[in-house]
Image (cartoon, coloured by chain):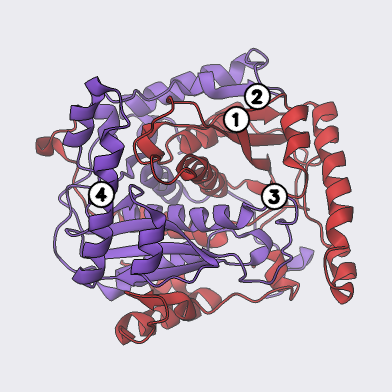
Chain colours: A purple, B red
């Protein structure tokens, strides 16, 4: 099927259940650290997650991502050791009254999850000049992040957990996985079946930081202009309230 | 509801239609440039897209994003002028035999789309020390990209189009929208109702670049090791073939 204007696919909303599925995956997705089960992830599920990632948007269609599927305990231990070192360094960076809380947080499941996936960005994937990357050089990195988010949402749809570990020296990961210099490790993900999803993000539940009021993050036409569109702001507040009360999926979507 | 281990939500797959919705949004999402309709986006739809974005993962739960909702034609014209300048510069960077093709591509819908949304990243949103950003400084930028991808998938679920414009000097956008220095513009999005979705990405359909074979983007345990797991690779090839033939959503998902 060629992509001529004559054969566009209809731009209609997905049917109600399918549309709800998208919002449900988005709202109930969590960063999983402590709930991994040792059961292997079936090939057919892992394959679908990778298909989801591969169909992310990419700048100039360069598809800069690769996926390292890491199961070898020795490789994972190297990464975990890098985490332990960085985690200890990180604790000392926080104000003294927060250091104990920080140390008590479970922040990764590298060894417990049955599989780790490192998503990378090959900056040379499509040659030196890429449509859309000519003026903003980071666009290819952002494409790989979109692949991560696709994978994460697909995993939620499949009932799996994903945790993104970022507390280590990226160079250690690069060497542990033998990743070439031109290729950037973007995300190190722990993936697997889990005991359950936390109802809220763990840092929110632990009182580390609150969910920010969405209506205060909106500006109209220019930064700082927050008064131009009362209708949208009212709607945002009502939607956020419905999310907080667990009523968004039932009450705020098209039927 | 506190996030104690005793009240985890069950980690089961979404019901079949909801799960299919997630994959359908992922596979049929497109970067829209030339198909925008002038109809306004209803507040209730725009609000849901922003709720989806706000529930992206963020490093240390810092929620670094803000959303500039841009409708003012004068502001949009400034951005469009920046695009035209950069687009002309970009054309000259390509090999001569590709310059005419490049110039013929429609790459943005800034003026045609009824609303533009600039997604930003406030690097100071949660103070200088952020959980998970201590060793990889770009993590907050990546969080804002996750918000973009959430918004994009929600827009697909709602039947809307989104186009990410990256061909301009980011400094011009920063000044046109009066965005403070500490805040980084991550994505400039054109959003609206559209005439339809292209069956394939336009750059793929135009022969600019092919879809890469997913099984060649997989490594096992270490970069370059592509032979360790034939079962997964076979599955990936079959899944990718099903995507290409339009049979993935009907044939490859759990019933």
* Quadrant, the N terminus of chain A: bottom right
Residue A161 shows in this picture: no
Picture quarter containing residue B230? bottom left
**Mark 2 and mark 1, same subunit?**
yes
Residue shown at the point (23%, 47%) measured from the top left = A33
Nearest to viewer (mark 3 / mark 4):
4
Image marks 3 and 1: residues in contact by CB distance under 8 Å: no
Q: Which residue is mark 4?
A: A85
Which element type, helix, strand or loop, lies under badge 3?
loop
Using the image, name the chain to which the residue with label 2 belongs: B
Side of B109 relative to A103 (left or right) = right
**Mark 2 and mark 3, same subunit?**
no
Q: Which residue is mark 1?
A: B183
Which element type, helix, strand or loop, lies under badge 1?
strand
Distance CA(mark 4)–CA(mark 1): 31 Å
> Which percent across, then down, holds residue A233?
56, 18
Residue shown at the point (43%, 46%) measured from the top left = B136
Which element type, helix, strand or loop, lies under badge 4?
helix
Side of A68 relative to B67 (left or right) = left
Distance CA(mark 3)–CA(mark 1): 16 Å
Q: Farthest residue toward the left?
A: B6
């Amino acid at each position: 099927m060629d992509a001529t204007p004559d054969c566009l696919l209809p731009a209609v909303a997905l049917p109600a259940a399918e549309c709800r599925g998208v919002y449900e995956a988005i709202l109930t997705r969590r960063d999983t650290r402590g709930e991994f089960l040792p059961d292997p992830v079936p090939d057919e599920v892992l394959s679908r997650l990778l298909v989801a990632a591969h169909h992310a948007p990419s700048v100039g269609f360069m598809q800069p991502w690769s996926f390292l599927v890491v199961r070898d305990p020795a490789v994972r231990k190297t990464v975990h050791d890098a985490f332990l070192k960085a985690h200890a360094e990180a604790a000392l960076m926080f104000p003294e009254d927060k250091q104990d809380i920080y140390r008590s947080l479970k922040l990764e499941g590298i060894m417990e999850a049955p599989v780790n996936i490192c998503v990378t960005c090959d900056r040379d994937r499509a040659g030196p000049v890429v449509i859309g990357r000519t003026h903003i050089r980071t666009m290819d990195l952002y494409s790989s992040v979109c692949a991560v988010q696709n994978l994460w949402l697909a995993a939620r749809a499949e009932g799996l957990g994903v945790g993104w570990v970022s507390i280590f020296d990226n160079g250690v990961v690069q060497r542990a996985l033998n990743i070439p210099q031109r290729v950037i490790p973007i995300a190190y993900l722990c993936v697997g079946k889990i005991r359950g999803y936390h109802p809220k993000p763990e840092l929110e539940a632990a009182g580390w930081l609150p969910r920010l009021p969405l209506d205060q993050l909106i500006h109209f036409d220019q930064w700082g202009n927050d008064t131009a569109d009362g209708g949208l702001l009212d709607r945002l507040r009502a939607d956020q309230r419905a999310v907080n009360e667990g009523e968004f999926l039932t009450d705020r979507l098209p039927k």
